Amino acid sequence: MIQHIHTPVRIRVGVGEMTCTVCGEVTNQAYCMRCNEEADVQGNNYAQVAAKRGRMVPTVSYLRDGEYEVVG
């Protein structure tokens, strides 16, 4: 019988890393750069895009203890 060995993978998360709830992009900014580019936002209208498209949440908020390591 072949025994399967499971090696858990730990996700590397940067200090202050945020994840967009719309597209899944990760960044250390207070807004999603991908959603802003797709919306063709000009100037400083990041709050408008965030209100329409989704919001940023800390990446570690949806990971379990032991699934990640903070780097940086």
Image (cartoon, grey):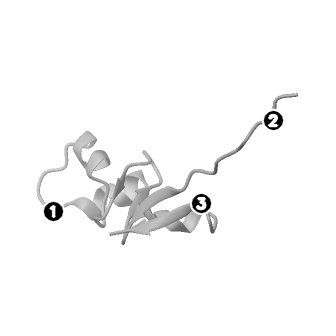
Pointer 3: what residue? Answer: 67
Q: Residues within 10 Å of mark 1 (few under 14, many from 20)?
A: few
Residue ranking furthest to the front: 1
Left or right of residue 57: residue 72: left
Which amino acid is tagged 1?
Asn
| Nearer to me, 55 or 26 | 26
Q: Give the residue number, with chain letter if any, for mark 1.
A: 44
Which kind of residue does numbered mark 3 sit on? Glu
Residue at horizontal 38 percent and vertical 60 percent from the top = 51
Secondary structure beneath label 3: loop
| Residue at the extreme left of the image, as rendered | 43
Mark nearer the viewer, 2 or 3: 2
Place of residue 23 in the rendered image (x, y in percent of width and height, measured from the top left): 42, 45
Q: Residue at x 30, y 61 (%)?
A: 31
Q: Position of residue 4 (x, y in %)?
A: 76, 36
Q: Are marks 2 and 1 in contact (CB under 8 Å)?
A: no
Kindly report the distance in space between the C-alpha atoms of the residues bearing marks 2 and 3: 23 Å
- Residue 45: percent from left, percent from top: 20, 60
N-terminal label among 2 and 3: 2
Nearer to us in this view, 25 or 9: 9
